[in-house]
């Protein structure tokens, strides 16, 4: 038991890095994903559609670990040197943006046509319709899949260990190499991953319920908030 | 406004549609269709399914384009092509926005914004499009909702409202832009029968206030009471037009007569008249 406690500081330090990678890479993925999805909304707009499509196919058609190696090991050959953490965040975020953009695109498509028509009938310009009418509804539709990708990204952040980012898995590997206590160390590492992923998935499920437009509870809440 | 101005207003139609044609592939949907609507006029469009009623009213705010023909809405030219080109004429998006801010539309499926309360639905366009100050827009929106009998529903989301209430919110939303005219496309068809009356009542009040309205509906009773003119469409053409009395009681064209007979009237008096007439 006391040995586990002695490992904890370095494992928790690793967990912190894992969470950092996850949050920053997810932010990159979300922003890029929305941009890509918007670029691909109108196939007739070729100068946006084709580059975005090529990018997405490239990202989805090659292994994430290869992309990671590319950014970290191959770019220095052309004199681009990137810090391992930044390389990890970039590669993972860029990779996930491809998947997320597909989620966003189909969610945007799933907002009923009538919403576009009603908004444009009021004379709202395109960008405003997107921002005020389509995105808020598409966001709700996208939440479950986006949440799954978020947890997927959290776990995939372990790949950053291969480019010497001292995140949770790599911290475990270092300890294991010193102590040979593989079973205990990787067991604790697994528990630490679960400690984050399980509550996150519960939280996401609660959030889904909260923003569900067909549940009455929320607007009752709103009324309470308003009168309070 | 000056008297001279008002006079000229009453002479030029608010909405001009001349010789509209449109086809989807080889299917003609509008066929040399013309209709002028004067300020304050209530025109009811009737006709069998697929006759082009929806397509026509959607051309008036640019949700549909026409292949040829001329459309002028409150002085703004939406379409002006005398001969069929290869491509339907697409108006500039600023022109479209301008017209849409001036012409309201109410849909069969309500199309309220589900993530906003009734009040927010009504305020959205005035605040974001017209840049009306929030407080002013809110006051006006509450007035409109109150007028529609929805004062106590302002904070409700669309899914918490009945169909009839949703449709009245949709009418308030259109009214909030102070439109010169409102287009209604079968706005009671998706409603349970017991909810139709409250929506028609609201529309009747609008008409009484002088709103220019083009209404696609099969509600005979409403058309009889409210319409200045009834227009019968079939196969994308204007078959016959006249006062409700003329169209419903003594139609000239056999297609109109057939169609009018085919509509089951919810009004027992009309059924009686029909029985006596035959
Ligand atoms: N997007 C489209 N593509 C092909 N054909 C279409 C399209 N929209 C409408 N049509 C056709 O155009 C014709 C007119 O349709 P429209 O919806 O205007 O008729 P309507 O009079 O409103 O009918 P209803 O009473 O059923 O609403 C129909 O034959 C319809 O099938
Ligand atoms: Mg129709």
Image: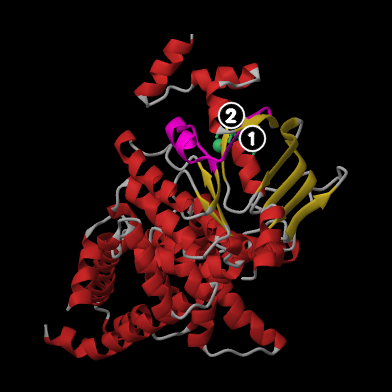
Q: Are marks 2 and 1 in contact (CB under 8 Å)?
A: yes
Q: Quadrant of the C terminus of chain A?
A: bottom left
| Residue interval drawn in magenta | B215-235
Q: Which residue is mark 1?
A: B52
User: Same chain for marks 2 and 1?
Assistant: yes
Residue drawn at point x = 32 percent, y = 53 percent: B159
How far apart are labels 2 and 1 at the CA level?
8 Å
Residue drawn at point x = 65 percent, y = 66 percent: B3
Q: Position of residue A66 (x, y in %)?
A: 57, 70
B212, B151: nearer the viewer: B212
Above/below status of B261 relative to A66: above
Q: Position of residue A44 (x, y in %)?
A: 72, 56
Q: Tag 1, which chain? A: B
Cβ at disc 2 under 8 Å from ligand 1: yes
Cβ at disc 1 under 8 Å from ligand 1: yes
Q: Tag 2, which chain? A: B
Residue drawn at point x = 30 percent, y = 86 percent: A178
Label 2 vs label 1, nearer the camera: 2
Rendered image quadrant of residue B57: top right
Q: Looking at the image, is mark 2 or mark 1 earlier in the sequence?
A: 2
Q: Which residue is mark 2?
A: B47
B126, B181: nearer the viewer: B181
């Amino acid at each position: 038991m006391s040995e586990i406690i002695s490992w904890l500081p370095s494992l928790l330090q690793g967990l912190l890095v894992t969470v950092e990678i996850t949050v920053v890479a997810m932010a990159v993925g979300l922003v890029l994903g929305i941009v890509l999805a918007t670029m691909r909304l109108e196939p007739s707009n070729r100068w946006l559609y084709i580059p975005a499509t090529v990018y997405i196919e490239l990202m989805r058609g090659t292994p994430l670990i290869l992309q990671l190696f590319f950014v970290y090991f191959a770019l220095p050959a052309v004199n681009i040197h990137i810090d391992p953490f930044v390389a990890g965040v970039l590669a993972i975020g860029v990779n996930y943006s491809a998947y997320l953009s597909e989620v966003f695109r189909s969610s945007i498509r799933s907002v009923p046509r009538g919403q576009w028509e009603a908004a444009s009938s009021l004379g709202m310009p395109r960008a405003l319709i997107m921002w005020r009418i389509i995105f808020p509804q598409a966001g709700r539709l996208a939440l479950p899949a986006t949440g799954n990708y978020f947890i997927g990204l959290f776990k995939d952040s372990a790949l950053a260990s291969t480019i010497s980012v001292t995140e949770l898995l790599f911290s475990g590997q270092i300890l294991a190499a010193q102590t040979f206590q593989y079973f205990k160390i990787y067991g604790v590492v697994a528990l630490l991953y679960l400690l984050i992923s399980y509550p996150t998935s519960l939280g996401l499920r609660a959030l889904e319920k909260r923003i569900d437009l067909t549940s009455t509870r929320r607007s009752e809440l709103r009324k309470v908030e308003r009168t309070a | 406004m000056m008297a001279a101005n008002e006079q000229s207003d009453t002479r030029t139609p608010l909405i001009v549609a001349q010789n509209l044609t449109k086809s989807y592939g080889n299917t003609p949907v509008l066929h040399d269709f013309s209709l002028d609507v004067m300020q304050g006029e209530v025109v009811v469009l009737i006709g069998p399914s697929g006759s082009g009623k929806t397509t026509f009213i959607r051309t008036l705010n640019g949700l549909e384009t026409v292949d040829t023909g001329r459309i002028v809405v409150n002085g703004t030219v939406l379409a002006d092509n005398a001969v069929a080109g290869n491509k339907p004429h697409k108006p500039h998006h600023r022109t479209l926005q301008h017209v849409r801010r001036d012409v309201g539309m109410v849909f069969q499926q309500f199309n309220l914004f589900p993530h906003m309360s009734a009040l927010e639905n009504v305020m959205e366009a005035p605040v974001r499009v017209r840049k009306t100050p929030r407080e002013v827009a809110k006051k006006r929106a509450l007035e409109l909702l109150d007028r529609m009998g929805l004062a106590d529903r302002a904070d409700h989301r669309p899914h918490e409202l009945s169909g009839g209430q949703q449709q009245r919110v949709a009418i308030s939303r259109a009214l909030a832009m102070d439109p010169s005219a409102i287009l209604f496309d079968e706005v009671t068809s998706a409603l349970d029968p017991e909810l139709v009356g409250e929506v028609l009542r609201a529309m009747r009040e609008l008409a009484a206030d002088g709103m220019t309205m083009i209404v696609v509906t099969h509600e005979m009773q409403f058309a009889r009471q409210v319409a200045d003119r009834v227009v019968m469409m079939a196969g994308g053409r204007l078959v016959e037009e006249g006062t409700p009395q003329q169209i419903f009681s003594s139609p000239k064209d056999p297609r109109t007569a057939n169609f009018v007979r085919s509509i089951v009237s919810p009004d027992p008096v009309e059924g009686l008249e029909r029985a006596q007439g035959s």
